[in-house]
Image (spheres, grey):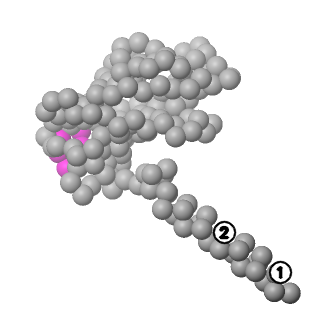
Amino acid sequence: MNKKILIDLIGIELIALVVVVGFKLSPILLPKADVTVMPDPACDLQKQACAVTLPAGGKVELSMGDKAIPLVKPFGVRVTTSGFSPSRVELDFAGVDMNMGYNRPELALQGEGRYVGEATLPVCITGHMDWQATLLIEAGSERIAIPYRFATGGQE
């Protein structure tokens, strides 16, 4: 009888541990934003830079080159900000219809208001893949999210 109780207690402790670890990691895996700004859906990140004006003032521009975003090859990412000074800039890539794993490079400050980095997208076995690249910006105590949609592979 004591052995069964001990096994049950160990099981309950393991479940509690999983819940605590999940709770602690949730802000990393599922970022929360204080402000979400929707970009112009007509802006194509694979052809041009896309700019957004923030509600509290300031402007953000994201550029991922001027041609199709490659798969399994590094490509440059550039963010330019004006009117405010972010303390952190990240770009979170997520598959719209398929989980493609954690992919969130942090961009490095390269001068006043200019952040650069490199990203690599995994290949999708179906060829065509819809992506959401969410720009995450921390400015003061506020976290701003700007979700951009684009597609790779297949006929575009």
Furthest residue in direction bottom, as rendered: 1
Amino acid, disc 2:
Leu
Q: Main secondary structure of the magenta part?
A: loop
The quarter of the image holding the N terminus is bottom right
Furthest residue in direction right, as rendered: 1
Circle 1 or circle 2, nearest the eye: 1
Residue 39 in which image quadrant: top left
Residue in front for this viewpoint, 28 or 152: 28
Secondary structure beneath label 1: helix
Amino acid, disc 1:
Lys
Residue 50: x percent and y percent?
31, 27
First reached walking from the N terminus: tag 1 or tag 2: 1
Residue 52: x percent and y percent?
27, 35
In three-dimensional space, the C-alpha distance between marks 1 and 2, rounded to whole angstroms, equals: 15 Å
**Residue visible at 71% across and 74% down in the picture:** 10
Residue in front for this viewpoint, 138 or 44: 138
Residue 60 in which image quadrant: top left
Secondary structure beneath label 2: helix
Question: What is the span of residues highlighted in magenta in the rendered image?
Answer: 53-58
**Residue visible at 43% across and 38% down in the picture:** 104
In the displayed structure, does residue 111 sit left or right of residue 153? left
| Mark 2 Cα-neighbour bin, 10 Å: few <14, some 14–19, many ≥20 | few
Residue in front for this viewpoint, 70 or 47: 70
Residue 98: x percent and y percent?
63, 37
- Res 2 visible: yes
Residue underneath mark 2: 14
Residue 31: x percent and y percent?
43, 51
- Res 43 visible: no
In the displayed structure, does residue 68 sit left or right of residue 35? right
As for residue 16 lying within the magenta part, the answer is: no
Q: Which mark is residue 4?
A: 1
As for residue 56 lying within the magenta part, the answer is: yes
